[in-house]
Image (cartoon, rainbow, N blue to C red):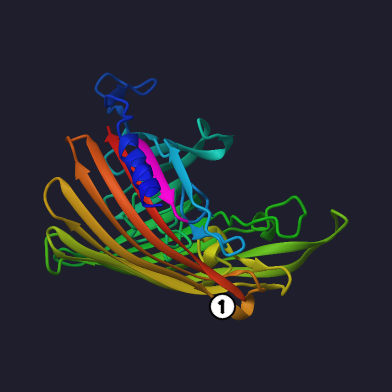
Amino acid sequence: MTRKIGLVLAGIAMAGMMVISVAAVEIKISTPGAVSNAPLLTLKVYGYVKLDAAYDTQKTSAGDALYYVLPKVNGESDNEFNMTARETRLGLALAGPDIESLKTTGKIEVDFYGNGGSQNSPNLRLRLAYLDLAMPSGTAVRAGQDWDTFMTVIPKTVNIAIMADVGALGLRRPQFRVTQDIPIYGKTKLVAKVAAARTIGEDIDGGMQDDGADSGYPSVQYNVCLETQLLTAKATKLSVSGHWGNETLDSIVSNVVVDTDVKDYNTWSVIGSLFLPVHQKVAFQGTIWQGKNLDTYYGGIGQGINKTLQKGIGARGGYIQLITDLTDRLNWNLAYGIDDPDNQDLNDGNRSKNQTVVTSVYCKITSAVTAAFEYYYMTTSYKGQSASSDNRFQGAMIYKF
């Protein structure tokens, strides 16, 4: 077994040799009908090429990305090895044209984690697509697809799942957001955000309609964040945030809708977040949260509505992470995360707790190329069944442009 793991880890290291060179591009475009001295629209290409290779001592969901550990079969572990370039990312940063009282920017970003396709021919996935309008008064409007408004901090991990379903709430979704910066004194300010966002649910009732869309209105997301300088020049951030929305189910008989909008299930969260730099090269960050029906926000270990008990699944959790830049080229991180659904909302066999300890190292080989290694120890508990644990060893090579 030791020799086998050694060969796999060697394969992970060798995987990093597959790097593709890409040059940065910046394009300036005159707007149609504009005079010669009019401001320009600037397009800047950015992104990275990334190869990931991971060995797991027990099968996980979902292979390339790590969310939770699957149960053992007959008490026996089932190891696996995955290698992918699907996280390779391509983006366009847009800026202008501006006017005196309005600054215009935007972003479009994709990767290759789209549904369908195959491991060596994956499909595109839209990550970000939004426009920003910012005013000198500190008011800004964002329209498009972006990270959830309630997110203040994001874990730094090699794995693309970024501790989803194990302590870190949130993803990306279409939304219309208004932000207001409120100066308090010096470099201290309050940043208030509110958004109307699409309620992305599932088709729990089998009526061929997203249950979030069936509710007939968007979710509300909010974030109130205090930013100030405490111990370093980097801003400390302390926020309270969350969301509220609804999913609606129809009555289905033999795959036919016989009655519409028969039951509503609320989805909500309350979140406390902190980013605390204690040194120019050392910082702590994390969140604590509680809520209900959080599967599409990566809470409740991917469980939102219990159709058998006809109730939303409540959950609580959070994570804490130490981030250190040991040198200009070397970064080391250590984190713990937990997602703990309410047992009374679960059936036997449902996922009842998910915990992880994760550590990662990033090493810059050049100004553009980084090698990374990450170790996860994750344990997923199941109601009425034995827990299942996994050791994940993941290596990556990243070329940013």
| 229 drawn magenta | no
Say which quarter of the image contains residue 224.
Answer: bottom left
Say which quarter of the image contains residue 287.
Answer: bottom left
Question: Magenta segment range?
Answer: 49-57
Circle 1: residue type: Asp
On the image, the x and y values in percent for residue 51 come to 37, 37
* Picture quarter with the C terminus: top left
| Viewer-proximal residue among 91 and 115 | 115
Residue sitting at x 32%, y 35%: 14
| 52 drawn magenta | yes
Say which quarter of the image contains residue 367.
Answer: top left
Q: Is 324 on the left-hand or right-hand side of 46?
A: left
How would you rate the neighbour count of disc 1 (Cα within 10 Å): few for under 14, some for 14-19, many for 20 or more? Answer: some
On screen, 399 above or below 372?
above
Residue sitting at x 77%, y 54%: 207
Q: Tell me the chief SS of the magenta region.
A: strand
On the image, the x and y values in percent for residue 181 come to 29, 60
| Viewer-proximal residue among 224 and 11 | 11
On the image, the x and y values in percent for residue 167 come to 42, 66
On screen, 229 above or below 81?
below
The answer to whether one can see residue 106 in this image is no
Which element is circle 1 on? loop
Q: Which residue is mark 1?
A: 342
Residue sitting at x 72%, y 51%: 209
The answer to whether one can see residue 158 in this image is yes
| Viewer-proximal residue among 384 and 140 | 384
On the image, the x and y values in percent for residue 220 come to 52, 63
On screen, 93 above or below 283?
above
